[in-house]
């Protein structure tokens, strides 16, 4: 007899058959939980595969029709767009250009597959010459101009047809500024996915190659969260919700599984997204390329771990490929 009554006395009995294991699974991964990031460029020199992220490409907006149809056919419900513009400017004003690559990509995707949920990343780092996430001084962001630029960028994406925007600059008050700007011009039906608990992480390395968004000086520790802090994530989530976020995010996902679990416990009803960032994928790819890991099994395990920790949805560069695996799955 099991003296604790926490579970069966011989847990192994219910693991011995595949059918029994399937019956008692707690967390599952299905294609409906996947968000596919896409890099969009108007620069012929940037188009094509990203060396640091095997399997990931930068697309021209005009190429996205078939990508949209393919994802919808596979059952992937959503994409998250990142711009890699040919031209940068000192302040990053081009981020709000209605003819910019992301706005054009939104229109292409929605025209080809209206049911595909199109979310856009809202941050200035790929658009500013200095690679910083917004205008700043010696003590961090200049919040007024940062909010104005982020709100203009979000509004331009909504005008192009985006279903939602995902502010990732980690500027205090950015969700409120964007929510107000969207509401003011009638886009009160678009969602805001807050990058609410976004850490200053070493695991963003390959992304900064892909998005050409590395800061030219300094780093992002002045505004992104300190990886030493867990409780603070709960306050960041609460703030974004108070400012009007519809969904919230923990990023990076794998190194912050504890944070995902705490957010889930503290906010049982909040739609929660976890981002498997570029460096997490790069670790698996690099080990698999050496034959040290089973790539497919490691990827599936890393993603179901985010679900087990409490995430509703996961952002992963491997979304499309994972969807093909899930279609053929007999575990
Ligand atoms: C920036 C942004 C970053 C990522 C998503 N949005 C990079 C950063 O903050 O420097 C990282 C994503 C990844 O590593 O996959 N706006």
Image: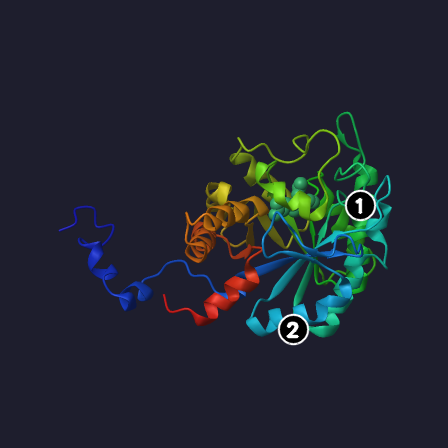
Q: At 44% from the left edge and 49% from the top edge, which residue is drawn?
A: 309
Q: Pointer 2: what residue?
A: 69
Mark 1 falls on what kind of element?
Answer: loop
Q: Residues within 10 Å of mark 2 (few under 14, many from 20)?
A: some
Q: Which one is in front, 5 or 289? A: 289
Task: Kindly identify which numbered label has been placed on residue 171.
Answer: none
| Quarter of the image with the C terminus in it | bottom left
Residue 289 visible at all: yes
Q: In the image, ligand 1 is in what quadrant? A: top right
Q: Residues within 10 Å of mark 1 (few under 14, many from 20)?
A: many
Rendered location of residue 21, percent (x, y): 30, 63
Q: At 81% from the left edge and 62% from the top edge, which residue is drawn?
A: 159
Residue 242 visible at all: no
Rendered location of residue 107, percent (x, y): 77, 67
Q: Which one is in front, 194 or 130? A: 130
The vertical placement of 24 against 229, above or below, is below
- Looking at mark 2, is its residue's CB closer than 8 Å to ligand 1? no
Q: At 59% from the left edge and 44% from the top edge, which residue is drawn?
A: 237
Q: At 68% from the left edge and 72% from the top edge, which residue is drawn?
A: 66
Rendered location of residue 69, percent (x, y): 65, 73
Which of the 4 image quarters holds residue 196?
top right
* Count of marks overlaid on the render: 2
Q: Pointer 1: what residue?
A: 127
Mark 2 falls on what kind of element?
Answer: helix
Q: Residue furthest left?
A: 1
Rendered location of residue 156, percent (x, y): 82, 57
Upstream in sequence: badge 1 or badge 2: 2
Which of the 4 image quarters holds residue 139?
top right
The vertical placement of 145 against 102, above or below, is above
């Amino acid at each position: 007899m099991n003296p604790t009554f926490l579970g069966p006395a011989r847990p192994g009995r219910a693991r011995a058959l595949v059918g029994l294991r399937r019956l008692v699974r707690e967390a599952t991964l299905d294609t409906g939980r996947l968000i596919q990031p896409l890099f969009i460029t108007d620069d012929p020199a940037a188009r094509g595969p990203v060396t640091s992220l095997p399997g990931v490409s930068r697309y021209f907006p005009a190429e996205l029709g078939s990508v949209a149809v393919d994802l919808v056919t596979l059952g992937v419900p959503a994409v998250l767009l990142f711009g890699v513009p040919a031209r940068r400017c000192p302040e990053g004003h081009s981020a709000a250009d209605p003819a910019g690559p992301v706005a054009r990509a939104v229109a292409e995707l929605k025209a080809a597959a209206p049911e595909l949920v199109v979310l856009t990343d809202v941050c200035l780092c790929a658009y500013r010459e200095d690679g910083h996430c917004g205008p700043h001084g010696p003590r961090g962001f200049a919040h007024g101009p940062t909010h104005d630029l982020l709100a203009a960028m979000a509004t331009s994406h909504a005008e192009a047809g985006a279903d939602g925007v995902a502010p990732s600059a980690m500027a205090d008050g950015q969700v409120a500024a964007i929510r107000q700007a969207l509401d003011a011009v009638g886009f009160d039906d678009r969602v805001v996915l807050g990058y609410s608990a976004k850490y200053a992480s070493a695991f963003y390395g390959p992304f900064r190659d892909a998005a050409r968004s590395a800061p030219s000086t300094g780093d992002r520790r002045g505004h992104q969260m300190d990886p030493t802090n867990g409780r603070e994530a709960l306050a960041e989530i609460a703030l974004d919700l108070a400012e009007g976020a519809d969904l919230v995010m923990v990023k990076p996902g794998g190194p912050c599984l504890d944070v995902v679990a705490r957010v889930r416990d503290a906010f049982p009803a909040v739609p929660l997204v976890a981002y498997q960032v570029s460096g997490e994928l790069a670790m698996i790819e690099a080990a698999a390329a050496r034959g040290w890991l089973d790539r497919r099994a490691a990827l599936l395990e890393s993603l179901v771990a985010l679900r087990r920790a409490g995430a509703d949805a996961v952002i992963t560069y491997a979304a499309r490929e994972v969807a093909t695996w899930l279609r053929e799955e007999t575990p």
